[in-house]
Amino acid sequence: MSLALLSILAIVFYLGGASLLAAPLTGCPRTPQRLGLGAATLAVLLHIAVLLGAHGGRVDLHFFAALSLVACVVAALTLLVNLSKPVAGLGVIVFPLAALLLGLDTFLAPPTTPNPLDWQISLHVAIALFGYSLLSIAAVLAVLLAVQERALRTHRPIRLVRALPPLTQTESLLFRLIGAGFALLTLTLLSGLLFIQNIRAQHLIHTTVLSVLAWLIFGTLLWGRWKHGWRGRSAVNLCLIGMAVLLLAFFGSKAVLELILHRTV
């Protein structure tokens, strides 16, 4: 089966899963949430098959390939989160984005060849990937938390709120995700210090500086939560700012190098 067909099937299942999860939010008759998550699971498996087939089983860190890889990991982790804390709203946002980024990589991105990575750099990349993905999910959850708080504060309940756990549980899940992502981000920075030899030659100065800044923002948020009980809008804003900085750290520099300067590393 061709990679293009696998990609189309994955996109269909991603969008189908998101539609099933979103059905109760639009007033349609309730559909089994398991059916939506099952469709998304098939999408993730097909997405993995596309990534393996397109890049020969190696990790391709070029711009569009990296976006697709991160989207796949985020979608997979979203499924795992829903096993313990059903949060249908996450899938409604994450799965269509995964479909979009897979489509961009498959049908619009220029062909690329993965750079060979030794085991130390592969380990560094894997830690970074999971940390980034957990914090991405936390950012989506922060947006949903803000919507949930606003609906409760204005006494104007919206259907999206029904797809979320109670406010305290949503907030607890948010900080657990941030805590896990922060720990992995810390390991990413430490492994980078150990394994990356020349950050200037590898065009990693901006990535490193912005990653450290994001680490400080998330660390401040966790410290404020522990010391002063930060929550609500302050927590949401810091989470989104930290995620924006982290997004720029990797994909911002990648976009400039590959899409504007037409340089690949």
Image (cartoon, rainbow, N blue to C red):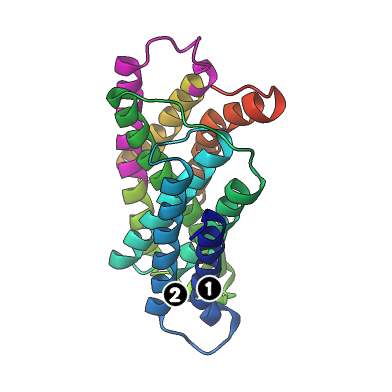
Residue under pointer 2: 36
Q: Earlier in the sequence, mark 1 or mark 2?
A: 1
Q: In terms of depth relative to the viewer, which is nearer, 73 or 55?
A: 55
Residue 75: % across, % down:
43, 56
Do callouts 1 and 2 mark residues in contact (Cβ within 8 Å)? yes
Q: Is residue 220 above or below residue 20?
A: above
Q: Quadrant of residue 219?
A: top left
Residue at image point 37% right, 77% down: 34
Question: In this image, 60 relative to 99: left or right?
Answer: left
Is residue 69 covered in magenta? no
Farthest-out residue, bottom:
29
What is the count of numbered marks? 2
Residue 159: % across, % down:
55, 77
Residue at image point 52% right, 50% down: 233
**Residue range highlighted in magenta:** 178-207
Q: Amino acid at mark 1?
A: Gly
SS type, badge 2: helix
Q: Amino acid at mark 2?
A: Gly
Residue at mark 1 to residue at mark 2: CA–CA distance: 7 Å
Residue at image point 45% right, 63% down: 43
Q: Quadrant of residue 28?
A: bottom right
Tell me, yes or no, if residue 224 can be seen here: yes
Residue 117: % across, % down:
37, 25
Q: Is residue 156 above or below residue 3?
A: below
Residue under pointer 1: 16
Q: Is residue 63 above or below residue 89?
A: above
Residue 68: % across, % down:
51, 46
Q: Residues within 10 Å of mark 2 (few under 14, many from 20)?
A: many
